[in-house]
Amino acid sequence: MIAPLAPPFAPLNERPGSPLYRQLYDRVLAAIAAGTLSPGDRLPSARALSKELGVARGTIELAYSLLTSEGYLLALGQKGTVVNPELQKPLASASTLPVSSKVIEDSPDALWRPPQLLPFQMGVPALDEFPRKIWARLGARYLRGMRLGDLDYPAPHGLPALRSAIASYLQVSRGIDCGAHQVFITSGWRSSLSLIAHTLLQPGERAWVEDPGYPTTRQVLRQFGIELEAVPVDADGMAVEHAIARSHAAKVVMVTPGHQSPLSMALSLPRRQLLLEWAARNNAWIVEDDYDGEYRYVSRPLPALASLDRNGRVLYAGTFSKVLFPGIRLAYLVVPQTQVAAFERVGRALFSANSPSITQTLVSEFIAEGHFTRHIQRMRRLYNERRALTIEALERSLPGGMQVERSPGGMHIVLRLPEGVSDIAMAEQLLANGMSVQPLSRWALASRPQSGLLLGFTNCATAARGEQLGALISKALS
Amino acid sequence: MIAPLAPPFAPLNERPGSPLYRQLYDRVLAAIAAGTLSPGDRLPSARALSKELGVARGTIELAYSLLTSEGYLLALGQKGTVVNPELQKPLASASTLPVSSKVIEDSPDALWRPPQLLPFQMGVPALDEFPRKIWARLGARYLRGMRLGDLDYPAPHGLPALRSAIASYLQVSRGIDCGAHQVFITSGWRSSLSLIAHTLLQPGERAWVEDPGYPTTRQVLRQFGIELEAVPVDADGMAVEHAIARSHAAKVVMVTPGHQSPLSMALSLPRRQLLLEWAARNNAWIVEDDYDGEYRYVSRPLPALASLDRNGRVLYAGTFSKVLFPGIRLAYLVVPQTQVAAFERVGRALFSANSPSITQTLVSEFIAEGHFTRHIQRMRRLYNERRALTIEALERSLPGGMQVERSPGGMHIVLRLPEGVSDIAMAEQLLANGMSVQPLSRWALASRPQSGLLLGFTNCATAARGEQLGALISKALS
């Protein structure tokens, strides 16, 4: 049935501080909470609702895609959008995981990389599908036409053409309103984070980091003498309200709002807004690590947290490692307008855009000629397939009762292991069988790490390999 | 006349701690000091002396080239080698400049780079002479044959083929006995120095730095909380014996033994050995910044300081910015055998070899196919010419009495300005006329900086430009 979305449809009115998409988002959530909308109920199409409410279709789609990404709605393609049938528990309890904020040391070997490419390795895109011919053509053209300036030191903050191509891309694809002068090229996430730390942070200041979260982020911050405070994540992402209530004030918040790293849920809109308001009130910085924001399978990619920032508190970090290939060593940072001068000064002193001209030029041409958008779209379809076949193969071959989490996006699957099973031992055993998975517990900062495996499905995933992996895990568990 | 080198030639005997070339070096110096060899005297040819003394010709050539680079001898090509006719003052006084060691702040704008390539810019090789066709051919071949592994993260310490090509090159060309596993790839001098600081240094420890010296070196060390102690340089390079006698003990010594940066003299052999002995006794590190060691015009390139190191105290840093082109962002570090494991651990954690696979592969093939050695030889000849025509043009156009220093190597000329003339004002005036020179005073750390201009002659140098520069300086001085 088509669910009544508070009929007769009350009109939405633009109000300061409450954009239309947010009003619609709140209304749908309220309807689900009140039981007006039940699990399985179908929502009006964006087109129909747009007509009904007299607002742009994009506004409706934005609200729907946020709700979909947060798991409240389910997009069924031609069949429309329904309230997630698996939605059982009342909304109010979504963010009530126990919180233990505390600074803990990482194990030094938190990074888990085999020396060569293996199946299920995390964070590696489909290298076999990278358009190497197009790349070789662009490269040969660049090399033939190289000018003297191409041999000189690259521009201190990155090639102007690349900065401007990135700004346009972010505007269209991630909803970030920025100019090329706000984009700073770096050679990877470490370099981006180092540039931020050099420019905005002082030793002894505090950062909130997600727990579990990306070990490299913690490692870099520690190198700068930053104190870490672990903030747990639940179904709505980083537990922002708990951190605000119970943690020491932070100078910077490290967050992965698109797909939490590594658990893959999106940061909910209320938490996004709470975090932005808190940062503005406290003059704190938010670093949005959008490492694989391009890859969502259930709906359009979420707009970036940075797109909601009205107070210039968000630093947005993107990378080409996941959408092109890791060997390119190119990433970027978008800084608030007010911080451009400071980043220019520090970036020049650090020589932070320390990437060769050839890769910067190739990427800027790859974007400008439209290959980039096409490649992302193609990979999104491909990864959706590889994700489905990996999950299906695992479900066929894993012991009954083990469930694979279906995250709305990202490049890996989280497979929880039964209580008491060591994910580290399991990962080592799988590595001995030529399969590289990461143990979830290594991403934990708090005292009681969860046991699970992180399985990359984007590179070299086949049904046969998925079954092989499932069989190996079954055998190890039995 | 052919000078009598202590005839009848006393035989040289291999003794521990005193290699043959060192014995010969000492003997020639003693002969000059005693007046047995006078300014202008011709020395026996390496071939003749090798026969006479029964030692390898290379041994003789090594001693001669050290003495030549230190200014005691002059190589006249076909005409043989003579005692430098300009050698007037007794040797004992060579190292007695007044020493003032003290920690002083850099001005923040110590780096002086115009936005585009201008004549006389320092540290820029002859970009017009870079073999772009060969480079494009290697690049196109690489791009056509790219394999999946080329798209993955580069190996943590650098591409194995590149590390091994560098080790072979250093063995042959710089006399450094090292294996590929001791070579760590980085993306520039800053990255190399950061890797050293992360691995070997602690905040609060002290570094001796040459004064004047490279501002970037000081800047990076300060970022790591290293205390700087200025050590003056004189005609024999860094005043090592004064630093040992008068300075606080250092954990690390930053030195440019090949051509002092920026004054271009070589560190004398006695000082090299004194520094090595002192470092071994005090468990201190020596960082040899061999930024342009390939470019000597009066003799063969000097062997690196690292080639004399028997106690594993020297870290040797090289770069491809000066021998290929700066836009390539590739450099390397050779670490002592005992420190390999520590550098591997830290390098992996920092992901220090953060350079794309394409540039690493191209350089390794450029070296392996012999283009590298040919290019260096070609550039050495070209730079020698450009240096000569620049000096001649300046001498034609500068006011009488102003002398251009003839350093034995490097990529720039030092032009001292008369007492009281501001080199910063002069450099700004020249920049307004489209010529980029660096003011020497910006390289100073001690209280009384010398006034002078540093003129790069390797890129876009012509006689006309030299005369134009000389005329502009003359006009400014009059």
Image: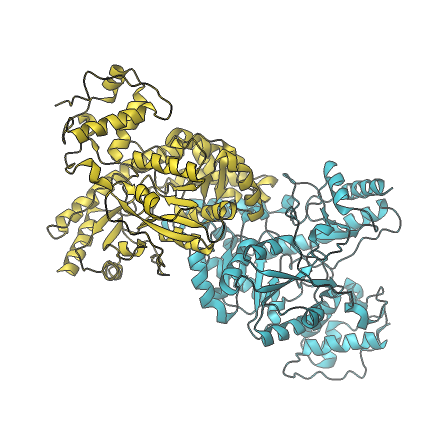
Chain colours: A cyan, B yellow
Looking at the picture, tell me which residue is in the foreground, B76 or A43: B76
- Is residue B59 toward the left or the right of residue A416 in the image? left
The residue at 37%/51% (across/down) is B229
Residue A5 visible in the shown view: yes
**Considering only vertical position in the picture, is A101 above or below A419?**
below
Count of marks overlaid on the render: 0
Of residue A58 and residue A452, the one placed in the foreground of this image is: A452
Residue A349, x across and y down, in percent: 42, 58
Q: Residue at x 55, y 47 (%)?
A: B351
**Residue B17: x percent and y percent?**
37, 26
Quadrant including the C terminus of chain A: top right
Q: Quadrant of the N terminus of chain A?
A: bottom right
Outermost residue toward the front?
B245
Pick the front one: A223 or A351: A223
Q: Which residue ends up furthest to the left in the rendered image?
A: B400
Q: Is residue B370 above or below residue A199?
A: above
Q: Would you say B311 lies left or right of A223 here?
A: left
For the question of whether residue B319 can be seen, the reply is no
Q: Position of residue A192 (x, y in %)?
A: 54, 57
Q: Is residue B451 left or right of residue A465?
A: left
Residue at the right extreme? A400
Return the x and y of residue B352 as percentages of the image width and height. Answer: 52, 46
Q: Is residue A78 above or below residue B295?
A: below
Task: Please tell me which residue lies in front, A476 or B445.
Answer: B445
